[in-house]
Amino acid sequence: MTIKVLLADDQALVRAGFRSLLARSRDITVVGEAQDGDEAVRMAASTHPDVVLMDIRMPGTDGITATRRIVAGGAVPGCRVIILTTFDSDEHVFAALRAGASGFLTKEVEPAELRRAVAAVAAGDALLSPGVTRRVVEQFAHRQDLSPGAGERLAALTFRELEAVKLVALGLSNHEIAERLVISPLTAKTHITRAIAKLDVRDRVQLVILAYESGLVRPGGRAS
């Protein structure tokens, strides 16, 4: 199956560079290029990409707003967004993840890593490893107010599922969660998959964000 990718960046040279890197994969095809957020939303609706590589900082409509319109707004069902940023400490990354992005890459990404990232996100995985996700969320979570109703949503989870969500937010992998809860890795994965479905979040990244917004886990790696 060919993965369709839309490039959104206001710099033509950056788009050309990513197009060239992705062209080396037989399984990936670039279906369009957008130079701002509005154009990205329009082109996503017309080309139906599997993945959008979205720059955060663009003139006019920025990448965060465009991501929200494409993903959370349901403009392109099934489409996932990878945020492109110059620095992995960009404070806008957290806002982009909240808007529905499945992860982020720095623009200095290695060619092989870029292609692996596109394939992983197209397959439905969150791009960031649990530990990286936690560090990004922690860095900016203290600036965010707790989300009204986020805690109430957690009431839908079983005790085991809630434990698993806490450990995901603390940066543990499925195998580490299995060891901590004395269960099999498959059972740990099942708990997390069910939690994602019950909480109606998109992926593991969104699960971590909800854990912080609800107060279930606090910046500094402390569970409530």
Image (cartoon, helix red, strand yellow):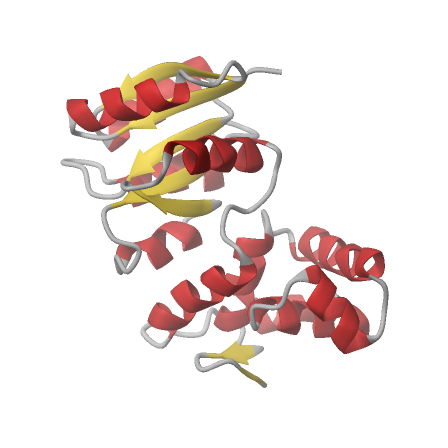
Asked whether 13 or 34 is in front, the reply is: 13
Splitting the image into 4 quarters, where does residue 177 fall? bottom right
Asked whether 87 or 71 is in front, the reply is: 87
Residue at the spot 58% in from the left edge and 59% down from the top edge: 207
Report x, y in % for residue 131.
51, 64
Residue at the spot 32% in from the left edge and 18% down from the top edge: 20
Quarter of the image containing the N terminus?
top right
Instruction: Using the image, determine if residue 206 lies above or below residue 166.
Output: above
Asked whether 201 or 221 is in front, the reply is: 221
Q: What is the number of callouts on the image? A: 0
Residue at the spot 56% in from the left edge and 15% down from the top edge: 2
Quarter of the image containing the C terminus?
bottom right
Instruction: Using the image, determine if residue 196 lies above or below residue 6.
Output: below
Q: Is residue 105 shown to the viewer in this render? A: yes
Q: Is residue 100 shown to the viewer in this render? A: no
Report x, y in % for residue 94.
36, 58
Splitting the image into 4 quarters, where does residue 13 fall? top left
Asked whether 141 or 83 is in front, the reply is: 83
Report x, y in % for residue 78.
57, 30
Residue at the spot 49% in from the left edge and 45% down from the top edge: 102
Report x, y in % for residue 25.
48, 18
On screen, residue 193 versus residue 141, left or right, reads right
On screen, residue 136 versus residue 201, left or right, reads left
